Amino acid sequence: MNMIDVISKKKQRQDLSEQEITYVINEFVKDKVPDYQMAALLMAIYFNGMSAAETAMLTMAMAHSGKVVDLSPLAGIKVDKHSTGGVADTTTLILAPLVAAAGVPVAKMSGRGLGFTGGTIDKLESIPGFRVNLSEQEFIDNLKRLNIALTGQTPSIAPADGKLYTLRDVTATVDSIPLIASSIMSKKIASGADKILLDVKTGQGAFMKDITQAIELATLMVDIGHKVGRETLAVITNMDQPLGMAIGNSLEVAEAIEVLRGNGPQNLREICLQLGSHMLVMGQVAPDFQTGYKILEHILDSGKALAKFQNFITAQGGADIINNQGVLPQASILCDIYCQQEGYIQHIDPAGLGLAAMKLGAGREFKGQAIDLSAGIVIYHKVGDQVFKGQKLLTMFSNDESKINNVKENIVLNFSIVSNISQVVKPQLIMGIVDQTGFKPFS
């Protein structure tokens, strides 16, 4: 068996066997398959797809490419949450401590940014001292003590996915349903959670541009989860505009703190309450969604979630950012952009803004690229807002004036402003859920 034959087989639209998939993953982890050959296979998969059986086999091969964490000795039902990636999606930083404060253990493995979307690990690394890589024992100890533990992809947990994750980002193979599904589910399986909640994004700021694709991806992941004994639920959420107002690592951390204080963007707060309510039901802390929602509203508004967030940050070596946000990385150059006309915001292109933030330094354009943790964009309006000529539309943050200059000329093109409010349709935040019985639209 050799890599050229495997690439050729997939190029010819043939299904790979379990032995071939296992061979590829094991040899790639051992560095016996070079990046250029794996990139060729990724591109063949991108264009020709994988069957459900192939995707399940790829998921398990990636999950078992390292150690699978056993959390069964710990009390409670451990619930993990994963987002397929969006713009200004700071959900994890809010949701994890919120749900943990309600009594559900949250065991989470997170990744770095892909394409125009941000990564939770990059965001957390903007907190001085915060350790994103925990040993298995540290992960378990934090979970036992605080009900929350979050780690990056260490060499011992799903190492194949860690390597593939980075390669996909720079080979334009991010938006492949089987590759997304196997990446997400392999991490979830390897990190040991009992149950899994998936936030599957759809829209212009997501990898799944239309809801049909999102449902296909969600259905595949839910099916994989149940096949390996993990109850899995997917919520389809809208990414036709940025979820929050901040796009960029330290900027999103600051925004998460505002939401945990009971403030912040309404859309971001609402989606955390919605997703968290499902997690409380899955964790058997709440008997139904409505009860879970009320529990989380109280925890959020009482400050308990904020306290849990700081305890979690402190436990992983991070600074006190609740009382001193000034320790977060600060950009040296700020550039305000103003509205050029009066009217109502009809559309905001989240992908365009995500790419602009990347060009300012907040994301990666090639494998291993260092990012500027202080760079990014803050917008001041959402779809449906009335704006006036000369009103501030957004602020760009960077430490490189040339990057500001390269972005600022066209950044207003990401906003569409119309004269009549009747021309505006606000995006629906929650589109529906996918469980073992299929898709159920949100009413």
Image (tube, rainbow, N blue to C red):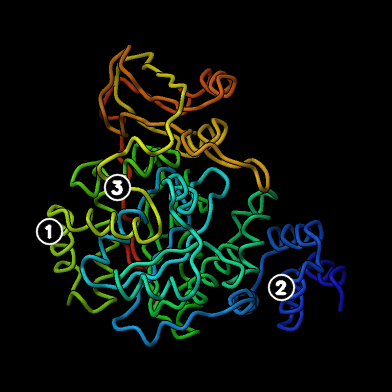
Q: CA distance from mark 3 to mark 1?
A: 17 Å
Which amino acid, by three-letter code, is at mark 1? His
Q: CA distance from mark 3 to mark 2?
A: 37 Å
Residue 370 location (% of width, % of height) = 61, 41
* Crowding near the residue tagged with mark 2, few <14, some 14–19, many ≥20 C-alpha atoms within 10 Å: many
Q: Determine which residue is flagged by label 2.
A: 25
Residue 199 location (% of width, % of height) = 40, 60
Residue 52 location (% of width, % of height) = 59, 75
Residue at 48 percent across and 43 percent down: it is 204
* Crowding near the residue tagged with mark 1, few <14, some 14–19, many ≥20 C-alpha atoms within 10 Å: some
Secondary structure at badge 1 equals helix
Q: Is residue 138 above or below residue 322?
A: below
* 3 or 1: mark nearer the eye: 1
For residue 161, the mark is none
Task: Give the mark nearer the N terminus: 2 vs 1.
Answer: 2
Task: Give the mark nearer the N terminus: 3 vs 1.
Answer: 3
50 relative position to 440: left or right: right
Q: Is residue 356 above or below residue 430?
A: above
Which amino acid, by three-letter code, is at mark 2? Ile
The quadrant of the picture occupied by the N terminus is: bottom right
Q: Determine which residue is flagged by label 1.
A: 298
Snapshot quadrant of residue 242: top left
Residue at 62 percent across and 59 percent down: it is 165
Q: Determine which residue is flagged by label 3.
A: 268
Residue 436 seen anywhere in this rendered image of the structure: no
Snapshot quadrant of residue 355: top right
